[in-house]
Image (tube, rainbow, N blue to C red):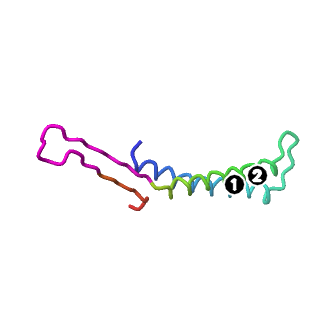
Amino acid sequence: MSLKQGYTFGYMSIGSGIALFVIGAILAFAFNIQASWIDLQLVGYILMGAGVVVFIIGIILMFRKRRTVTTVQNDVDTSAPGVTRSTTTDDGSF
């Protein structure tokens, strides 16, 4: 998985969380259907809770920083510096 795919997952989970919440709210508050084998209001509340959790996970995935440290040691040429270090920080901006 590349870096951009991880951020895509963050954005998709935000949208999925909102969709789950909206579907749950419709089931919990808009439908007035009685079924003997399922409680649609309870299913709506469960979907709303799942939507909130998925939304929060998406926010966390989108805003976390990734840091990569690479160290290269050069043993062949003694006149050049022996260690090169580069640090890359990705803050999530495109």
What amino acid does circle 1 point to?
A: Ile
Label 2, on which residue? Answer: 44
Mark 1–mark 2 CB contact (< 8 Å): yes
What amino acid does circle 2 point to?
A: Gly
Is residue 17 one of those drawn in magenta? no
Rate crowding at label 2 as few (under 14), some (14 to 19) or many (20 or more) other CA atoms within 10 Å: many
Q: SS of the residue at dot 1?
A: helix
Q: SS of the residue at dot 2?
A: helix
Q: Position of residue 24 (x, y in %)?
A: 72, 54
Q: Position of residue 79 (x, y in %)?
A: 11, 46
Q: Is residue 71 left or right of residue 9?
A: left
Is residue 81 one of those drawn in magenta? yes
Tell me the quadrant of the picture where the N terminus can be found.
top left
Q: Which residues are magenta?
A: 66-85
Q: Which mark is residue 80?
A: none
Q: Is residue 48 left or right of residue 58?
A: right
Q: Residue furthest front?
A: 78
Label 1, on which residue? Answer: 23
Q: Nearer the viewer, residue 77 or 3?
A: 77
Q: Residue at x 76, y 54 (%)?
A: 27
Q: Residue at x 50, y 58 (%)?
A: 63
In primary-sequence order, the first of circles 1 and 2 is: 1
Q: Is residue 21 left or right of residue 9?
A: right
Q: Position of residue 88 (x, y in %)?
A: 35, 54
- Distance in Å between CA atoms under marks 1 and 2: 7 Å
Q: Position of residue 83 (x, y in %)?
A: 24, 46
Q: Residue at x 85, y 39 (%)?
A: 37
Rate crowding at label 1 as few (under 14), some (14 to 19) or many (20 or more) other CA atoms within 10 Å: some
Tell me the quadrant of the picture where the C terminus can be found.
bottom left
How many badges with numbers are in the image? 2
**Above or below, comparing residue 60 to residue 36 in the picture:** below
Residue 35, quarter of picture: top right
